[in-house]
Image (spheres, rainbow, N blue to C red):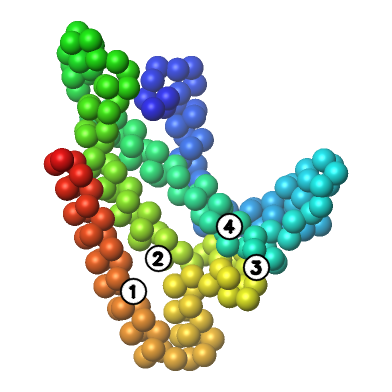
Amino acid sequence: MLLNEKIRARGFFRAAYFMPVVVSGIVISLLWQQLFSYENGILNLLLARAGLARIPWLTSPEWAMPSVALMATWKNVGLYIILFLAGLQNIPAWLYEAAGIDGATAWQKFRHITLPMLNPAVIMVLILSTIGGFSLFIEPYVLTGGGPMNRTLSAMLYIYKQAFYFNRMGYAATLGFFFAFIILAVVLVQRKVVEQEALE
């Protein structure tokens, strides 16, 4: 919402949010690998300076998947922000003006104008995030290789290992088609639910 307001350095903040999207996933993963490093990572250096124990972000079964998820979210959130921003800019200003004349509060404007008008953007973000979640590959491949104890083994990384580590090409191809149908089914259900809620 703030990125749609007339604030100082608005263009800079928009570019900063979108920058991780256009940078190579491998480069981003390598940078975060250094960030999560047990010995020299910035996070653990800050923890050590605060007198806290270092955390094995990428080698602990408890911390590995949250770390990968955090990095993947940070990389892709800029795209979702741009989609929501485009949706906000497509909302006619006269709707807010008319609501203000009728005495609507800021919350009422948000609930009855902004949210319904953002429905197409919400559908698109849900679809892209679902597809991105199922097709997660570069992040776990570079950061952890699927470990520790397969805690970060995503669907696409599993298919990749079956095909190129174990030479089970037929099995991997079948899994690929299977997951494609699952993604399609989930996306269709999500779209139906969101559209139904918008109608209500």
Q: In which quarter of the image is residue 114?
A: top left
Please indicate, yes or no, whether residue 26 appears anywhere in the rendered image.
Answer: no
Q: Residues within 10 Å of mark 3 (few under 14, many from 20)?
A: some
Q: Position of residue 76 (x, y in %)?
A: 45, 49
**Label 1 vs label 3, nearer the camera:** 3
Report the amino acid beneath label 3.
Pro
Q: Name the residue under label 3.
A: 61
Q: Is mark 1 on a helix, strand or loop?
A: helix
Give me the C-alpha separation between circle 4 and circle 1: 23 Å
Sequence-wise, which precedes: disc 2 or disc 4?
Answer: 4
Q: Name the residue under label 1.
A: 179
Give me the C-alpha separation between circle 1 and circle 2: 8 Å
Q: Mark 4 points at which residue?
A: 66
Give me the C-alpha separation between circle 3 and circle 4: 10 Å
Please indicate, yes or no, whether residue 61 appears anywhere in the rendered image.
Answer: yes
Report the amino acid beneath label 2.
Phe
Assess whether mark 2 and mark 1 are in contact (beta carbons under 8 angstroms). yes
Sequence-wise, which precedes: disc 1 or disc 2?
Answer: 2
Q: What element carries label 2?
A: helix
